[in-house]
Amino acid sequence: MNRNLLGVINLIHESDELESLTAFRCPASVPFGSRYRLVDFALSSMVNSGISKVAVFAHTKYRSLMDHLGSGRHWDLHHRQSRLFVLPPLTDDGNEVRRGDLFHFYQNRDYFNRSDMDYVVITRSHMVCNVDFGPVLEQHVETGADITVVCKVQSDLLGGTARKVSLDGAGRITGIQDHYGRLDSDLVSMEMYIMRKELLMEIVDSSLAQGKDHLVRQAIMGRLDELNVRSYLYDGYLGVVNTVESYYRNSLELLRPDVWRSLFFEPGPIFTKVKDEPPARYCSGAKTSNSLIANGSIIEGTVVNSIIFRGVHVAKGAVVRNSIVMQNGVIGENCVLDRVILDKDVRIEPFRELRGAESVPFLAGKRKVI
Amino acid sequence: MGRKEMIAMLLAGGEGKRLGVLTKDLAKPAVPFGGKYRIIDFTLSNCMHSGIDTVGVLTQYQPLVLNTHLGIGSPWGMDRRDGGMAVLPPYVKQKGGMWYKGTANAIYQNMGFIDRFDPEYVLVISGDHIYKMDYDLMLREHKRTGADVTIAGIEVGWKEASRFGVMHVSGDGKITSFEEKPKVPTSNLASMGIYIFSWTVLQQYLIRDEANRLSGNDFGKDIIPAMLQDNMHLHSYQFQGYWKDVGTIESLWEANMDLLAEKPALDLNDRQWRIYSVNPNRPGHVAGPEADIVSSLVTEGCVVEGRVERSVLFHGVQCGANTRIDDSVIMPNVRIGRGVRIYRAIVGEGAIIGDGVTIGSPDVQTITVIGSDECVTASHSLQEVEQP
């Protein structure tokens, strides 16, 4: 059945309050969870659901995303029967980049027209989750909905922001509002939409013809009376990662064994670009507890309640607590880090002390030397 | 097909009898090593770093795991249009096929493969050793001396020497004598089983050796002595660095332990000479709230709740609370319960160790081996556990 489903990861105007984490990369390529990038969750969910063609609508700052995705090999999307299409804006006018996502759907309509699949699933990249789209499509077909939106009941988004959804008694969506709206609902939209390809193409053409160029805000939210838009309830782990606070708090959630297991393994494994790092090396004085540690790291000091990415070196006497250290970070001897997020390639000189607050962790940009 | 200056023939058919239960279902080169690798990864990565892009891998014994691991050679950049990796098992011919009778016969049976690339030199290596070596430097030496064959040698302890082929060399590096596994070694310069032959010379000797019914068709026992007898030019290439034959339980265990030194002789973290392998794609490992891990290697996908000291944990190992693992090698996806004690052991892939089990003893020097997919529960006594 899923052979009939086409994937789109829509990065056009993705919500982003990730501060310096997205200074030179799009949210989709923000490193997360010791060795992943945000896009891996939507992409792996699609692949594990049997989707064989995925388009990534790249928008801005997508250099590192291209490097990460490559040919799609690591997601098994590089075969005759399965492909990954990275489709950046097709424009020679800088102003066009500012136009809404429907304009980009229109520009890439060949991707839809050339495929012989009947259904499309459109997602964003900032929803950290592990979804099987098979049952979503099944429900979509069974209920005869025009559009099915994957939603989750979750009252605390750990500082992330997401649209709220209201339903009528029969499961049809009656309202969708941006996070600051007054709609009182704990049903959160995961920004994942399944619909027939023809409907999408119709939405694209008729919305643009009326001067509307935003898929969700204008074409879907504005036509809830007319279209049968229904929700599918997802009950796995959801992290809405679009603010620094939610990035930090959702990262630390991964230290809960149930979250680690369900997010990374159920229903399928999350794939990412492999790096061929050796196993993590613990030296004689190492002390570690309640932490997530990737390959290639060398731990000589103390690591508590932290996420350590690939190739990180924690030197002797250094203490890393409640922190996230991205790839190739170097923590000098006798440093103390508490509630800190270090982007890639950050180097902390010996004897430094850095501390942040829980909702406002200290954030060091890529390649900083402190 | 373009001409290649040098191609490699990698002998990977070894049964590894001395590794006991560890090689019950797989060939020796496929035995897991060092937390995420298989033994053959070291030789293949060496080929890659030495600029060799064409490798024939000669398989024979239990090839399923090995073949799956090798695939089309992508991890080592050997999925090539010209050349690349070819897995070469023995095959049936018109006049009936036969197994590879010996190391030399394996190459003899694949002369057609080598001829397709019309190489000037052929590197013969095996997939049984742990080391990092630039074969290109050895090739340069081979060309400089104009030898017919260059054999890599390393100085080993006198006690060990009788396990290897040992060589005597003259002052300028010429090999004057070669003795395979002598009872009383007269030299401690051991052959590493790494040969660079000029292809035309090797061809002649392979054909001659095949015609000789008394020959064991082995490089160390037959080909090299025959060349010496003919006064051919045999040269030694002295290798300095870490090299370990991991053909026995003890040496396999030791080689794993060698990686845990504060400054290991073989550095896996060296980014200039990475060892490539098939990546299992697991999330970072979890060190639980009560975990205590020192002097160890831990791979992605592990969940460690207990104490781990001087041990190597492969991917997907689970280690329960109040468990203590010392001086051990735990292969992929082993599940270890709570309150377990493991001392000086090698636990095979997928084994299950139930709550409260004790394996090995802190006072005993022998290494306990648990075979893959074995299930050990508290009712088993130590004696029932298979010993090497």
Image (cartoon, coloured by chain):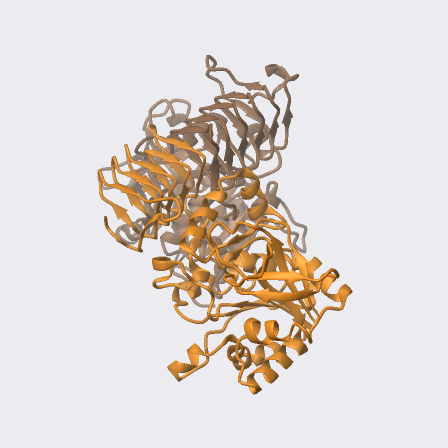
Chain colours: A orange, B brown
Outermost top residue: B363
Q: Is residue B39 visible?
A: no
Tell me which residue sits at (52%, 59%) in the image: A162
Q: Is residue B357 visible?
A: yes
Tell me which residue sits at (56%, 53%) in the image: A129
Determine which quarter of the picture holds residue B380. Answer: top right
Position of residue A178 relative to residue B108, above or below, is: below
Position of residue B216 relative to residue B77, above or below, is: above
Residue closer to the observer: A78 or A209? A209
Q: Does B317 sit left or right of A231 as displayed? A: left
On the image, the x and y values in percent for residue B130 come to 41, 38
Specify the quadrant that holds the N terminus of chain A: bottom right
Residue closer to the observer: A137 or B224? A137
Determine which quarter of the picture holds residue B191. Answer: top left
Count numbered badges in the picture: 0
Tell me which residue sits at (46%, 74%) in the image: A88
Position of residue A242 relative to residue A205, above or below, is: above
On the image, the x and y values in percent for residue A365 come to 31, 55
On the image, the x and y values in percent for residue B220 come to 44, 38
On the image, the x and y values in percent for residue B341 come to 52, 20
Determine which quarter of the picture holds residue B385. Answer: top right
Residue closer to the observer: B21 or A288? A288
Residue closer to the observer: A239 or B288? A239
Outermost bottom residue: A209
Q: Does A370 sit left or right of A152 as displayed? A: left
